[in-house]
Amino acid sequence: MGELSKDINLTNLDGITLAADYQGALSALDRGRTDLQPLSFSTYDRDGAIGAAMAPSVWRDGKVKTHLVFQIGVVAGLAANDIDSDEFQFALHTLAHECSHVEVTAEMDKAFPGVLLQEKITDHYAGRRWEVINATWDEYGATRISADFGADPTDGYIEIFLTALDARDVANDAITAYRTHGDVDQVMTEVVKAYGNLIKYSGYLLGTLDGCGKAVADYPSLSQALKDHWFADPFGRLHAELQKLWSNWGNLSDRKEFEPIADIFIEIMNEGGFYLSDNGDGSMALDIPLRPENTPYHPILAPFGLR
């Protein structure tokens, strides 16, 4: 930690928890406030990746800090006698990545005081947008800062990203099921998660590529997957927006600078036939028009304009 602190700002580090029972440690963490959502880790079935480390924000003496929580197995390699071993290098990168979240969170809190852990977003539409913005930028910043520490994580992030590229198929399956079950909350959760994960995992990948000085063209599997893919253009525009934000790192002062990230998120959902919009009163409107790819018996139902 002392060595990492020479390159990563750890001033706002609250503490570190290592646990065999990872979910138990997340549940037991004192975050300093009782009005925060419970912490839970990612699972492959639900999120396309397995979580084993987290950097949640906590409230301490009127200030936002970051506490690191690790499933002990992912950092056990730090005990290896050989620092050049795969185990040590993997653990080092994992530690550096989570430490980088400390710096990113501190910078966001500095740029927008009174927001993290304090602002209550009552506008559901704005809240959905900000969730995607925050997750994407947080991971872009952390991966870019930690890219050169320890093992190269690029192949792993490419694998996760390629899985997330199925977002439209996942969303269409969820919408098709919705035509039968009619549960708006369920289809909202499933479709928003599919597209939101695609944007977030793009942040992981792009931050790593930029941190390593690499490009999509350097990885044949990645460039081939994006060739002629519907997400290729949004992916490029998202990259440009993230790089633009990074160029202002340390001087960010207007939250509107982040809005293009959410604009792209909304755009790809709209293009997928899932229209989420703001009612203007804090609530959201949802329209899911019939399409052949997401509607059973589409030729029969389409003439009636059913939704």
Image (cartoon, rainbow, N blue to C red):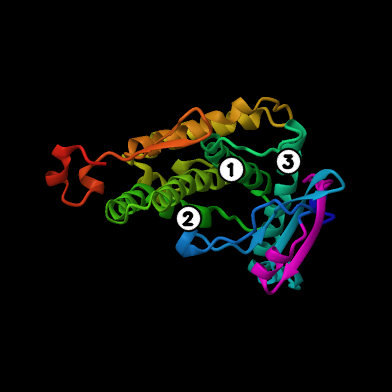
User: What whole-number distance in Å separates the C-alpha atoms at marks 3 and 2?
Assistant: 32 Å
* Most foreground residue, 268 or 217: 268
| Magenta segment boundaries in residue numbering | 6-30
The amino acid type of the residue labelled 2 equals Ile
- Under circle 1, the secondary element is helix
**Magenta segment: does it hold 23?**
yes
Q: Residue at x 60, y 25 (%)?
A: 256
Q: Which residue is mark 2?
A: 160
For marks 3 and 1, give the one nearer the viewer.
Answer: 3
Q: Residue at x 51, y 56 (%)?
A: 155
User: What whole-number distance in Å separates the C-alpha atoms at marks 1 and 2?
Assistant: 14 Å
Residue reaching furthest to the right: 61
Q: Which mark is residue 207?
A: 1
For marks 3 and 2, give the one nearer the viewer.
Answer: 3
The amino acid type of the residue labelled 1 equals Gly
* Residue 206 x/y as whole percent: 54, 42
- Under circle 2, the secondary element is helix
* Residue 244 x/y as whole percent: 59, 28
**Magenta segment: does it hold 170?**
no
Q: Which residue is mark 3?
A: 118
The amino acid type of the residue labelled 3 equals Gln
**Are the residues flagged by discs 3 and 2 in contact, CB closer than 8 Å?**
no
In-image side of 167 versus 157 (left or right): left
Q: Which of the two labelled residues, at mark 1 and mark 2, occupies the earlier sequence position?
A: 2
Q: Which of the two labelled residues, at mark 3 and mark 1, occupies the earlier sequence position?
A: 3
